[in-house]
Image: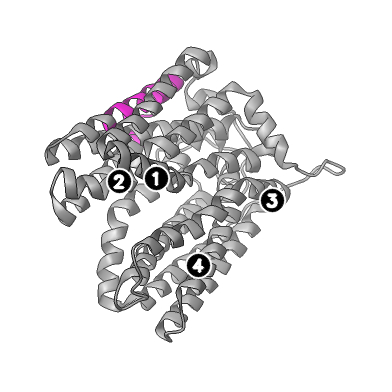
Amino acid sequence: MQPREPGRWGAFSYGPYRRFWLAAVARVFGLQFRFIGTGWLVVSQDGLDLSPIWLGIVGLASALPTIALTVPAGVLADRYEQRRILIWSQSATAVLSFALAFGILAGAIDVWLLIGWAVTVGTLTALATPAQSAILPRLIDMRAMASAVALTSSVWNTMRILGPATAGLLIAWIGIGQAFFVTALGFALSALLIATLRIEPLEREAGAEQPRMLDGLRYIFREPVFLGTIGLSFFTSVFGMSYQTLLPVFADDILDVGSQGYGFLQTAAGVGGFCGTLAMIRVGAGRHAGSVMLGAAALFGLFIAGFASSQSLAWSLGLLFLASFSSSMYLNIGMTTLQLLVPDELRGRVMGVWSMTWFLASIGGLPASALAEWIGAPLAVALGALSVSAFAGLLFLLIAELRRLPQPTELAAPAALAGGS
């Protein structure tokens, strides 16, 4: 099929992408019930009634295999059909979630079974993540990539606002075990929608070398734009996002606004991220995408540092909104840039490394919490945030290719598109 210009709806002009986006909505909605439901299962009297430390242990059990295996999974995304990887990984997650729901209702789940379950679904998340990025160019014309990245990001930002409240209310209404049925249904619907995608199968060259994981890493370290962009995501996750782990401390001890204020702070960050994504969809990055990306990253660090020093709820809400707005902008530009520049034969491995940096926030919270014990939460958060600003400034000075990065529409060449509308 001949490529056509993206319509006024951007990536939504393409039927395969619309199905992919709906699958993302179903999956991320299910994830909200998994995140909230797991926490309640661990600590509530209706669940396992364990001490709060087990929240961190169960969360780490899910995060570690995801972090460790996302990059190797990129090799699979480059070697095998990405659509099948997504179908099988999400179907397996649905089956496991159904099994956990039945186990909870039967009173047969203990903490060790829950940890084993968390390790398994974390592994399946690692398997699916690079394939989700690698399949994206097959659903659209490359000139719509910026729109596709922003629209996909909007799913996460919207669910970040609506998901926890919805999940919390429904768990209170239907119960913890029943909540995991919602997780299972979300993943099952996502797998079904992916299975109905009409895209041409990948054509592998006869006699071509099998993909090797180190080839992707070598490419990243050889290309300054990739090294700088992925390094910026790394700094954001490990150092800049430490405020999320310590946000309850700010709500309780510093701002003295209690659980309701804590919810407001979370909502302000979610709304900021959503508006930043909306700005990318409606306006774009302008003529100097690289400079906008680095400038937004520097502002993110300054806004979080300002939040760390704030003693006012109103100022804190505003600064969190601005910080999330900025981070949403530069991460969207970063992912769009990588998608447009990465060679197709390395896409799964390179995007696997990019995706792995997202999951490092759960690890970065640990040293931030330890540092907060020593110097206090405000200074610990400010130092982490300012390191992001400093790194963005260093990239601006050292990597000229990032400063001169053109608009995504100038990077995108017309590409053949399979499927229908």
- Residue 209 location (% of width, % of height): 82, 41
- Around disc 1, counting alpha carbons within 10 Å, would you say few (fewer than 14), some (14 to 19), or many (20 or more)? many
Amino acid type of disc 4?
A: Ile
Q: Is residue 299 magenta?
A: yes
Residue on which the image places disc 2: 246
- Residue 103 location (% of width, % of height): 46, 81
Q: Earlier in the sequence, mark 3 or mark 4?
A: 3
Q: Residue at x 24, y 35 (%)?
A: 308
Q: Are marks 2 and 3 in contact (CB under 8 Å)?
A: no
Q: Residue at x 36, y 71 (%)?
A: 41
Q: Earlier in the sequence, mark 1 or mark 3?
A: 3
| Corner quadrant of residue 205 | top right
Q: Are marks 1 and 2 in contact (CB under 8 Å)?
A: yes
Label 1, label 3: how far apart the Cα atoms are = 30 Å
Badge number at residue 76: 3
Residue on which the image places disc 1: 365
Q: Which residues are magenta?
A: 279-304
- Around disc 4, counting alpha carbons within 10 Å, would you say few (fewer than 14), some (14 to 19), or many (20 or more)? some
Q: Residue at x 57, y 31 (%)?
A: 340
Q: Secondary structure at mark 4?
A: helix
